[in-house]
């Protein structure tokens, strides 16, 4: 027997209480062209209806609760717009990883160095990882020397966040772009 599963979308709960959803006896009413006053919720609702606007609970923690008479759909639109602007201005840090072994030769080293420079110029952090496998585990000093050499080559465009350290069979070094 096959059953159809119905997935109901949960309605996103409104961040503000509006009109009849306000659960207080008295509220402080504010808004454009309105003098701030404390009155009963019913009185505030009738005032909002006369102006063809909504009564929106702005501050639920104050005593009495602060409600604003505004057009709620326009208010929500403005809030979304503000959030979008804040989100676009927020800085996202990107971490790029470059891996190599302790016995990496000069050509591969320079190739990876070129990539690291490009990443740092794009303002990304760079995580250098030396992977030790089987018999290469005995070359830890060589790996640390390689990481320090890498950091030294990039000292004019990067700062070392973490010095080389072992994590299991990997040795890590973290570089961030200079500001």
Image: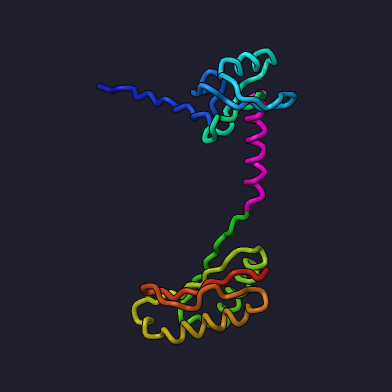
At 41% from the left and 84% from the top, the residue drawn is 140
* Residue 15 image position (x, y, % from top left): 53, 32
Dominant secondary structure of the residues highlighted in magenta in the image: helix
At 47% from the left and 74% from the top, the residue drawn is 172
Which coloring applies here?
A: rainbow
At 65% from the left and 23% from the top, the residue drawn is 69
* Residue 66 image position (x, y, % from top left): 59, 30
Left or right of 38? Residue 103 is left
Above or below 163: residue 54? above
At 38% from the left and 23% from the top, the residue drawn is 6
The quarter of the rendered structure image containing the C terminus is bottom right
The quarter of the rendered structure image containing the N terminus is top left
Q: Nearer the viewer, residue 75 or 125?
A: 75
Q: Quadrant of residue 84?
A: top right
* Residue 169 image position (x, y, % from top left): 37, 74
Span colored in magenta: 71-90
Q: Residue furthest front?
A: 38
């Amino acid at each position: 027997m096959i059953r159809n599963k119905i997935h109901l979308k949960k309605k996103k709960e409104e961040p503000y209480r509006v009109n009849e959803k306000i659960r207080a006896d008295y509220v402080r009413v504010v808004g454009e062209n309105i003098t701030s006053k404390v009155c009963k919720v019913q009185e505030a609702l009738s005032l909002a209806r006369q102006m063809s606007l909504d009564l929106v609970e702005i501050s639920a923690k104050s005593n009495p609760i602060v409600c604003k008479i505004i057009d709620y759909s326009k208010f929500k639109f403005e809030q979304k717009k503000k959030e979008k602007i804040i989100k676009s201005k927020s800085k996202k840090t990107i971490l790029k990883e470059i891996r190599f072994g302790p016995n990496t030769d000069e050509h591969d080293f320079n190739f990876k160095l070129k990539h690291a420079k490009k990443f740092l110029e794009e303002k990304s952090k760079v995580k250098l990882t030396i992977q030790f496998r089987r018999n290469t585990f005995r070359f830890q000093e060589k790996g640390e020397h390689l990481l320090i050499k890498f950091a030294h080559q990039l000292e004019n465009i990067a700062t070392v966040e973490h010095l080389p350290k072992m994590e299991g069979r990997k040795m890590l070094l973290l570089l961030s772009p200079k500001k």
